[in-house]
Image (spheres, rainbow, N blue to C red):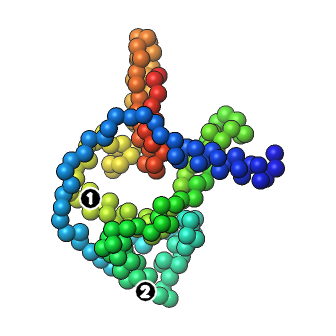
Amino acid sequence: MSRKEALKRWRDYFGGISTEEFPHPAVPSADPLHGRVHKVTVEETEADLRKIRPGKATGPNDLSADLWNSKFWCSTEWLAKFLNQVVAENKVPDSWQESTPIPIWKKKDSLADCSTYPPIRLLSHSTKIFMRIHDRRIREIVKLSDNQCGSVAGCGTIDAIHAARLLAKKHREKQKPVHIHSLSRVGEGLRSRTA
């Protein structure tokens, strides 16, 4: 297989898993809370910029962590002003809708099978800062239940995976079907299967 054919194969695979929709019940929603959105402060921006380690991979806009943490320009002030403009205009930049998928082989099954390479997706650093600031603000007013594994401190996904495997094993022993649903964080949709 030529390099061009391999790139097309990966593009088709990632395009498929990123846009494939799965049937799922409607997600219940509550009435929106209307109110003033507080401006992003320079201090918030600076605190989150410090969390970005130097040398981290860039996202689709190719702006490195080193650039954001540079002492040669007022990056925190500029970024805080930019993030406030995003909120005021109620429109995120088009580049924030993009990510760079990186396949990571899980050392299982065939090297030639694309599905054995679940992707991580690189986002731009400005997107991550915006999301961190607003995620922290939302967590201050919303109580996440302990079963939100991976989203709550001290509640990792490994325990949830173990519990799901144990549940599937018990149902197999009793020859009863079990329906498992999981929701991906990065827009891959709802996955459903019967174990």
Sequence-earlier tag: 1 or 2: 2
Q: Is residue 85 left or right of residue 107?
A: left
Which image quadrant is residue 56 in?
A: bottom right
Callout 1: 10 Å neighbours few (<14), some, many (20+)? few
Residue at horizontal 52 percent and vertical 72 percent from the top: 65
> Quadrant where the N terminus lies?
top right
Q: Nearer the viewer, residue 49 or 1?
A: 1
Callout 2: 10 Å neighbours few (<14), some, many (20+)? few
Q: Which residue corresponds to mark 2?
A: 74
Q: Nearer the viewer, residue 113 or 165?
A: 113
Q: Which mark is residue 138?
A: 1
Residue at horizontal 56 percent and vertical 65 percent from the top: 60
Percent position (x, y) of residue 34? 18, 61
Which secondary structure lies at badge 2? Answer: loop
Q: Is residue 106 visible?
A: yes
Q: Are marks 1 and 2 in contact (CB under 8 Å)?
A: no
Q: Which mark is residue 182?
A: none
Q: Is residue 30 left or right of residue 95?
A: left
3D distance between C-alphas at marks 1 and 2:
27 Å
Residue at horizontal 62 percent and vertical 39 percent from the top: 115
- When the figure is inspected, residue 180 is found, relative to residue 148, above or below; the finding is above
Q: Residue furthest top?
A: 174
What kind of residue is marked 1?
Ile
Percent position (x, y) of residue 8? 71, 50
What kind of residue is marked 2?
Cys
Q: Is residue 104 visible?
A: no
Q: Nearer the viewer, residue 169 or 21?
A: 21
Which secondary structure lies at badge 1? Answer: helix
Q: Residue furthest bottom?
A: 72
